[in-house]
Amino acid sequence: MKLTIGHLYPDLLNLYGDRGNIQCFRKRLEWRGMEAEVIPFLSGDSIDFSKLDIVLLGGGSDREQEIVCNYLKDIQTDFQSFVEKDGVVLAVCGGYQLLGKYYKTDKKTIEGLSILDITTEWQPERLIRNIVLNSPLFDTPVVGFENHGGRTYIGNHTPFGKVFYGLGNTGKSGYEGVVYKNVIATYLHGPLLPKNPHVCDYLLERALKRKYGPDVTLPSLPDELEHKANQYIVDRYSDKKYILKETIKRHT
């Protein structure tokens, strides 16, 4: 089996280790004897979404997002069709903001793709710290690092998770990110996937089922070290030990 991963505009949206997410997709497929093809699409390249199984839209500065916005207008219809047909997307930080209606900076408004019914508004105080989420999608917490000036308002969308430690979408809502169909949009850097192999496998399995049918499952991998690293971060930012199922139940 093979998955084709499209990395959108890595020449512009390349902050905070987004290439690490690509490497995680690739290696976790290869370790299972599956093939991974990664196609980087640079500024101005044409994109055939029908050939892609997973799309990564990474983070960039406000200036770079404004540049990317002009390219995104040309692919908006095809990108939205990919999402609505259950294409798998990981959008991080600037990529998360660009999936929405707009990002209003202190100087101008950057038009988004309107794939998600969300809006983002800049505030001078950046939200910067480690972050821990409890997501109903997983039995294991999601950990990462956030650094964003935008406050994202997600309306009626389902959040990626409840903030256990950190600031999240607005610093006040108590929630982080968005899950829509097979899209995960989030402010979590780090990069996200090497710190959270369960999130990587969730996206890979969604892509495999879409391509090869609902009976496809991912063989397990020996992730003891990865889980220990994840748990270390969770414990570090916990005031006391939590029974995970009780924590998830309490925050959903």
Image (cartoon, rainbow, N blue to C red):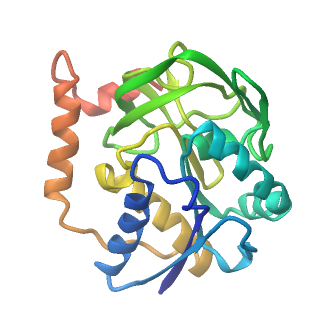
| Placement of 119 over or under 137, stated as above or below | above
| Placement of 196 over or under 75, stated as above or below | above
Q: Is residue 221 left or right of residue 25?
A: left
Q: Is residue 214 visible?
A: no
Q: Is residue 100 left or right of residue 158?
A: right
| Count of number-bearing discs | 0
- Quadrant location of residue 57? bottom right
Percent position (x, y) of residue 30? 34, 80
* Picture residue at 78% right of the left edge, 47% below the top: 113
Q: Is residue 69 visible?
A: yes
* Picture residue at 33% right of the left edge, 71% below the top: 28
Percent position (x, y) of residue 58? 54, 52
| Placement of 164 over or under 197, stated as above or below | above
Say which of 126 and 67 sits in front: 67
- Quadrant location of residue 239? top left
* Picture residue at 45% right of the left edge, 58% below the top: 202
Percent position (x, y) of residue 224? 14, 57
* Picture residue at 57% right of the left edge, 33% below the top: 159
| Placement of 166 over or under 230, stated as above or below | above
- Quadrant location of residue 212? bottom right
